[in-house]
Image (spheres, grey):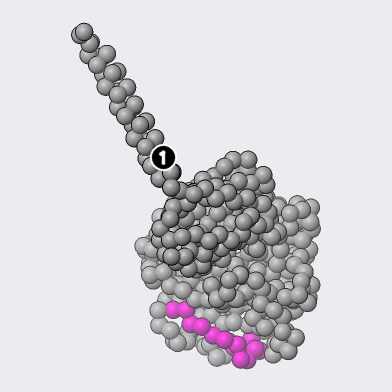
Amino acid sequence: MKLSQRGLRIAVAAAVLALGSVVSYVAAHAAAPDAKVIKIGAKRFDYTPGHLTLKKGEPVILEFSTRDVLMGFNLPDFKLRADIVPDKVTRVRFVPDKTGTFTFLCDIFCGTGHEQMQGSITVVD
Amino acid sequence: MAHRIDRRDFLKLAGLGGVGVVFASALPGVALAHDQDDFYFLQLSDTHWGFEGAPNPDAKGTLRKAIRSVNSLERQPDFIMFTGDLTHTTDNPIERRKRMSEFKQIVSELKVETVRFMPGEHDASLDNGKAFQEFFGATHYTFDHKGVHFIVIDNVSDPRALIGDEQLAWLAADLGQHAADAPIVVFTHRPLFDLAPQWDWATRDGAQAVELLMPYRNVTVFYGHIHQEHHHMTGHIAHHAAKGLMFPLPAPGSQPNRTPLPWNPAEPYKGLGFRSVDADADEARYAITEYPVVKA
């Protein structure tokens, strides 16, 4: 079978797209099998649970949701943050690389109790 | 020279002994010699009008006492700048406007004619500055006074603690009109640098503002938000946080939570106050004097 030049270009483009999709899929799921999913509910003005204990080097997926207003999750010691958008699930992959207890907080001003909206993560060996 | 008043004379004129003085200049400890172009302004911050609670049993009286202290200064400042959190936050938009109206009425008792305002997150973050603008006007702006260029940056109307691309472009355009050695004073509510991100004492894109300011050799930043005196350098740019006028907060990162420090009946109003800033425009030097709410 003889492909025209235009047909060849389309075939190559399709192959690249397909390969890209496979690579994206692999990249997205490579870490998934051993990553524990932890669901965290956010509402004005706290997180549930408000404290987590994690193991150093062990990947987790933090899965945030809220039915309230736009909020934030900020874990400054690991330079990790995300918006928590109402009625959507926000997933944050996190691999703690140091031990200790670290504060996370809402960094989007969400109302009268905003300044008390925080939690903590303890990372152990 | 008729207008030449040294720092000691000024404090004497102010009638307030025993106040703290910080010389915010490249040559610390050098008293400012005043000429007719020199001036001073006051920074009042974090009045949190509407707050009620144990950290300040005189919540309704503290601001009025501070105003009386300001009005008692023999030499009045050229202007007063309120650096945000004029009111304490409320989820109720009607109550928010009531607090702003009351605050505006109270500060109208100041003798100084020129009083400027900017919002804090308590004033502006729940409605993107809408109520603030109804009562006090623009949330970011510039003005010039006796050779000093003042820039008011709004890092609170976006509840994400962002200045935002649009305002950063505005800042860049404004700075572009000035020489690299122009004396520039910046007012913000939140710190532009990461003072204590775990307490939300930061501006998410503050580093971009600092980067824009960095080519200018004579920049000084005055801000509020943290309810205490604090001094920090980013390169050659000095950042000075002011005390509040409702409740003091703990030193950055000194405890797990940023809860107000308790009121001490033996030392009422401790940790609260306002400051004067003596400007020597020619040298771009600023002498800071801290004042208590009431005379000791």
Residue wearing tag 1: A29
On screen, residue B269 above or below A22 = below
Q: Amino acid at mark 1?
A: His
> For the magenta stretch, what is the residue range?
B10-25
Residue at image x 50%, y 53%?
A81
Report the side of B34 relative to B69 (left or right): left
Magenta stretch encompasses residue B188: no
Pinpoint residue A36: horizontal percent, then vertical percent: 49, 49
Location of residue B74 (image quadrant): bottom right
- From the top left corner, tell me how far across and down residue A37 is, in percent: 52, 48
- The subunit carrying tag 1 is A
Residue B17 drawn in magenta: yes
User: Residue at image x 52%, y 64%?
Assistant: A122
Q: In the depicted view, which residue is nearer to us: A124 or B259?
A: A124
Find residue B153 and report its horizontal and vertical position in percent. 54, 59
Q: Is residue A83 visible?
A: no
Asked whether, in this view, residue B204 is left or right of residue B60, the answer is left
Depth check, front residue: B89 or A46: A46
Q: Position of residue B62 (x, y in %)?
A: 74, 76
Give the residue drawn at x 43%, y 84%. Answer: B28
Q: Quadrant of the C terminus of chain B?
A: bottom right
From this viewpoint, is residue B239 visible?
yes
- Asked which quadrant contains residue B275, the reply is bottom right
**Image mark count:** 1
